[in-house]
């Protein structure tokens, strides 16, 4: 069959989740195929296959779980909204969303995760299929200016940060440190967070995702973090992170994924380190475990240190105090107050 290319450039006709691949498999081949796919991608294909990225939403089967991910893909939604066959036809190509989608699919990263080399056949079947920019680059370079479509512009709503209160009942030094924390949170809420632009559908969603991830991590460190001996940093372990995966979307599953998040944090004056707590902290597929096998011990932890714009060494106890006050004061609504940097009532 001819090659089918998705909106993001991935090869739908070779994707392990697609109907095109399923149609070529015999029933007695399925279990072996699932094990093969999971070994190299870390995920198991579903029996109910994906109908393909180019299929309109109203034609996707509603009882197929993989279609939820398909509908939620912002690159696909952006391409559909702008009426382009794939992202190569966009005048903004390659946007930050497409660059991010291709950042973790290199042969080197996969081999490092698996701790073994892979064959060319494995690369073509389970890695190259998701290297969408290879196809998009070729298509984009063949197009003339008149073939390109300018994407619709989305107006970014300014995050509703609550003004810093002027009636806090605490020593001036503590007020000053809390003010730095408020200012740093305000910076996150109203920054592009490293994006070239955020006015397309795909990049707008990426901005929202990044903002939510940073706020979610800070919330975890504040609520569950242990203050280090020198009081300059906070530490959380893998069990804490795992317990918050449903609440904080975008948490990485690999060390390489965490390194990309750390670079994003570093640009905001936050230094985060990955701390291995066991040699067998990853599965055979290379994904991070929650616990050391056969025990209740966490497999890894994260250590967060604050830059001068956060208040330096004073920021760790201030963040912890702020978050725990909000949790005690507002219960289930506390996180909503945190992402608005609502510090009213602290110290009273």
Image (cartoon, rainbow, N blue to C red):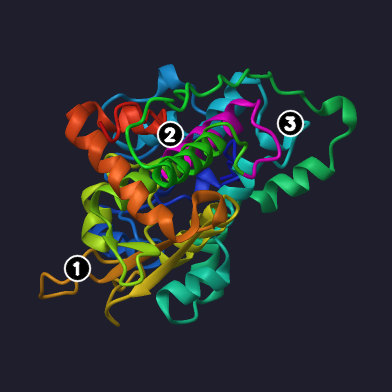
Residue 2, image x, y percentages = 60, 44
The one nearer the camera, 242 or 135, is 242
Q: Position of residue 328 (x, y in %)?
A: 17, 35
Q: Residues within 10 Å of mark 1 (few under 14, many from 20)?
A: many
- Which residue is located at x 67 percent, y 35 percent? 87
Which residue occupies 25% across, 71% down? 299
On screen, residue 122 versus residue 204, left or right, reads left
C-alpha gap between disc 1 and disc 3? 44 Å
Residue that badge 2 annotates: 70
Q: Residues within 10 Å of mark 2 (few under 14, many from 20)?
A: many
Q: Residues at badges 1 and 3 in contact (C-beta under 8 Å)?
A: no
Q: Position of residue 192 (x, y in %)?
A: 62, 37
Q: Which image quadrant for residue 324?
A: top left
Lower sequence index among marks 2 and 1: 2
- Residue assigned mark 1: 291
Between disc 2 and disc 1, the foreground one is 1
On screen, residue 257 above or below 292: above
* Residue 99 percent location from the top left of the image: 64, 48
Q: Looking at the rendered structure, which numbered label has been put on residue 90?
A: 3
Which residues are drawn in magenta?
Answer: 194-213
């Amino acid at each position: 069959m001819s090659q089918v290319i998705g909106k993001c450039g991935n090869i739908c006709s070779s994707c392990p989740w697609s109907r095109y691949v399923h149609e070529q498999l015999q029933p007695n081949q399925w279990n072996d195929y699932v094990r093969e796919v999971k070994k190299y991608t870390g995920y198991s294909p579903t029996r109910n296959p994906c109908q393909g990225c180019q299929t309109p939403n109203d034609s996707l089967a509603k009882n197929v779980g993989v279609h939820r991910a398909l509908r939620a893909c912002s690159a696909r939604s952006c391409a559909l909204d702008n009426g382009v066959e794939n992202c190569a036809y966009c005048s903004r190509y390659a946007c930050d969303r497409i660059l991010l989608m291709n950042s973790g699919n290199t042969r080197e990263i996969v081999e490092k995760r698996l701790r073994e080399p892979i064959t060319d056949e494995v690369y073509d079947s389970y890695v190259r299929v998701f290297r969408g920019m290879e196809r998009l680059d070729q298509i984009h370079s063949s197009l003339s200016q008149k073939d390109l479509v300018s994407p619709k512009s989305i107006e970014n709503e300014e995050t509703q940060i609550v003004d810093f209160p002027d009636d806090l009942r605490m020593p001036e030094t503590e007020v000053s440190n809390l003010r730095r924390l408020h200012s740093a949170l305000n910076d996150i809420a109203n920054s592009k967070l490293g994006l070239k632009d955020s006015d397309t559908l795909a990049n707008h969603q990426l901005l929202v995702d990044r903002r939510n991830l940073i706020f979610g991590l800070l919330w975890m460190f504040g609520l569950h973090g242990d203050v280090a001996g020198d009081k300059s940093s906070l530490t959380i372990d893998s069990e804490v992170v795992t317990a918050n995966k449903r609440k904080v979307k975008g948490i990485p599953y690999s060390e390489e994924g965490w390194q990309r998040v750390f670079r994003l944090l570093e640009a905001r004056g936050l230094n985060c380190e990955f701390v291995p707590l066991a040699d067998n902290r990853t599965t055979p597929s290379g994904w991070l475990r929650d616990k050391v096998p056969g025990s209740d011990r966490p497999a890894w932890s994260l250590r967060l240190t604050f830059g001068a714009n956060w208040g330096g060494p004073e920021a760790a106890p201030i963040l912890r105090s702020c978050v725990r006050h909000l949790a005690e004061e507002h219960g289930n609504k506390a996180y909503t107050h945190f992402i608005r940097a609502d510090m009213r009532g602290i110290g009273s």
